[in-house]
Amino acid sequence: MWRELEGRISGIGYVADTGCVLHELEEEEEKVEVLRGHSEKLAIAFGLMRVGGRATIRVCKNLRMCGDCHGAAKLVSKVAEREIVVRDNKRFHHFKDGLCSCGDYW
């Protein structure tokens, strides 16, 4: 499901920010694959599959959201036409129509 979403958001400008990968990997594709496994991306994809209608998707995590996931969540909120709320260890991020309540300052 995430790869499908990734394809849709790539069409409106998403490019994986491999600078967020902390592992020492040689290939860019390996870094992109690591980013695909981030918990909030998987949780958002699962929420979109399981929560019907236009209900808000809510995700809680105990670590800070990385820049790549933040950018991806903004675009997913736009293409899926859903509000997405992610609580990380610093703040609540309310994603709606491709924007975040934090103003991209977190």
Image: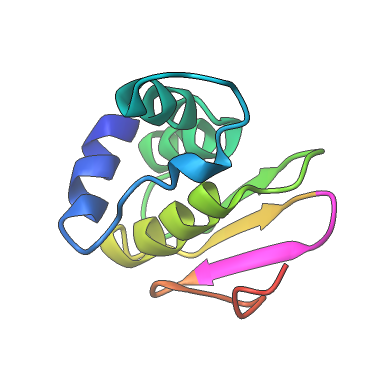
In the displayed structure, 87 sits above or below 37; it is below
Q: Residue at x 37, y 45 (%)?
A: 16
- Relative horizontal placement of residue 89, taking residue 81 as reference (left or right): right
At x 40% / y 42%, what residue is drawn? Answer: 48
Read off the magenta span: 89-95
Classify 39 as above or below 102: above
Residue 54 in the image: state x and y as whole percent.
Answer: 39, 60
* Position of residue 59 measured from the top left corner of the image (x, y, whole percent): 64, 45
Please name whichever residue, 103 or 31, is drawn nearer the observer in this view of the structure: 31
Q: Position of residue 43 (x, y in %)?
A: 54, 34
Inspect the magenta stretch and tell me whether residue 12 lies in it: no
- Lateral position of residue 2 relative to residue 46, left or right: left
Q: How is the image coloured?
A: rainbow
| Quadrant assignment, res 18 | top left
Identity of the residue drawn at 38% across and 46% down: 52
Residue 86 in the image: above or below residue 44: below
Q: Is residue 18 left or right of residue 90?
A: left
Residue 10 image position (x, y, % from top left): 21, 52
